[in-house]
């Protein structure tokens, strides 16, 4: 590869495999800090599934509520908040035709907050992600990883990574909001919190044998 190709590959790996995950986790802690009832239910699942030990990949099928929390976090604050495609041929959509060569921008942020699919869309509610609730919605009412043949190749790894990180940290730490500190969105390459995420980190009761 040329030097430019190597640089582009490295930058893509960093943005797609690191920053997006970090941003998703940041917004998740923000939401948990402001919704202690959800944090309590998450902690109850971790206590039941893990007890005092650290999570492993084998625990993923049992950490269903942890995954629901992350899914709802990425609904409200999708790290990739818009995605572009180009029409290779004329493409009919309902009464319209997208001409060949047109660039189309689709916004996860807007779609994920559409009340047709998500009643009371501004509310943080992980129960939207029960199997029954998901089956009742159209496929592309939720697409934090894109879709189609160009869906994010790292999606399975991202879920594994985020679930394990949330499980491991939530066992030992809780995040609390700082009174009077507002958090704004900053839509850049990813949907970041403007100026960082001000939270108080508090140690949970010590887990015996954890070494932490």
Image (spheres, helix red, strand yellow):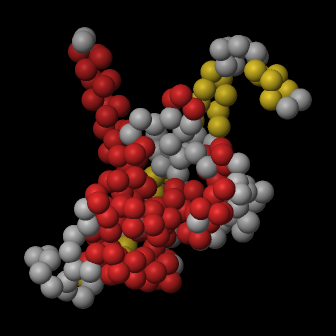
**Left or right of 4 on screen, residue 26:** right
Total tally of numbered discs in the picture: 0
**Which residue is rendered at x = 55% and y = 69% of the image?**
126
Q: Quadrant of the C terminus?
A: bottom left
Q: Residue furthest bottom?
A: 205
Given residues 170 and 185, the one toward you in this image is 170
- x, y percentage for residue 136? 71, 57
- x, y percentage for residue 116? 78, 57
- Where on the picture, by quarter, is residue 66? bottom left
**Left or right of 97 on screen, residue 155:** left
- x, y percentage for residue 112? 64, 53
**Which residue is rendered at x = 32% and y = 54% of the image?**
161
Image: 212 above or below 7: below
- Where on the picture, by quarter, is residue 200? bottom left
Image: 29 above or below 113: below
**Which residue is rendered at x = 40% and y = 77% of the image?**
45
**Residue 179 visible:** no
């Amino acid at each position: 590869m040329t030097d430019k190709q190597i640089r582009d590959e490295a930058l893509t790996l960093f943005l797609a495999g690191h920053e997006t995950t970090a941003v998703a986790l940041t917004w998740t802690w923000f939401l948990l800090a402001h919704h202690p009832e959800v944090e309590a239910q998450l902690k109850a699942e971790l206590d039941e599934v893990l007890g005092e030990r650290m999570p492993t990949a084998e625990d993923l099928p049992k950490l269903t509520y942890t995954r629901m929390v992350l899914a709802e976090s990425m609904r409200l604050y999708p790290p990739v908040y818009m995605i572009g495609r180009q029409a290779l041929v004329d493409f009919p959509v309902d009464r319209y035709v997208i001409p060949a060569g047109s660039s189309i921008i689709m916004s996860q942020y807007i779609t994920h907050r559409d009340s047709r699919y998500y009643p009371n869309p501004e509310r943080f509610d992980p129960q939207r992600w029960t199997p029954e609730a998901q089956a009742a919605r159209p496929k592309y009412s939720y697409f934090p990883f894109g879709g189609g043949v160009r869906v994010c190749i790292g999606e399975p790894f991202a879920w594994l990574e985020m679930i394990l990180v949330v499980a491991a940290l939530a066992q030992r730490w809780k995040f609390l909001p700082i009174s009077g500190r507002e958090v704004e969105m900053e839509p850049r390459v990813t949907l970041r919190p403007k100026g960082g995420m001000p939270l108080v980190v508090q140690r949970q009761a010590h887990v015996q044998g954890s070494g932490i």
